[in-house]
Image: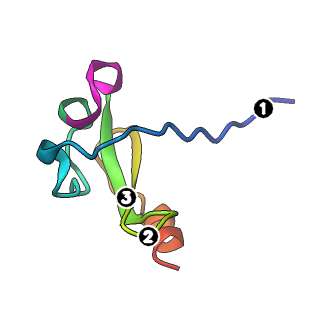
Amino acid sequence: MPVDYDLLIYEDLSAPMHQVPPAVGDAAAPLFGSRFSDHSVVAVGPGIHEGRVTVVLAFGREPMHEIQALLEK
């Protein structure tokens, strides 16, 4: 039986260049480094902690509406 994984990678984006949250469809590499060169931002929502933002990355540029809905709950 195949194993499915959820992966959360924490990146500290407190630098001044990261003061504006990314938008859905943005390329991930300029924000998170070259290891995410094949990824894009697919959902953005409130962070787990106050004052934080959750950014979801995935392959492709299409928004993930189901993930966006979960973030907005």
Estimate the x, y position of residue 23 in percent, counting from the top left.
Answer: 21, 57
Tell me: residue 43, above or below residue 10: below
Viewer-side residue, 2 vs 40: 40
Q: Which amino acid, mark 1? A: Val
Which mark is first along the chain, 2 or 1?
A: 1
State the image quarter where residue 40 is shown.
Answer: top left
Q: Main secondary structure of the magenta part?
A: helix
- Above or below, 73 against 37 in this view is below
Q: Position of residue 39 (x, y in %)?
A: 33, 34
Disc assigned to residue 3: 1
Q: Is residue 16 shown left or right of residue 13?
A: left
Q: In the rendering, at what x and y percent does residue 8 appear? A: 55, 41
Query: Which comes before the other along the chain, label 3 or label 2?
Result: 3
**Residue type for callout 3:** Ala
Residue 34 on the magenta segment: yes
Which element carries disc 3, helix, strand or loop?
strand
Q: Residues within 10 Å of mark 3 (few under 14, many from 20)?
A: many
Residue receiving disc 2: 50
Crowd around label 2: few <14 · some 14–19 · many ≥20 (10 Å) = few
The residue where tag 3 is placed is 43
Q: How is the image coloured?
A: rainbow
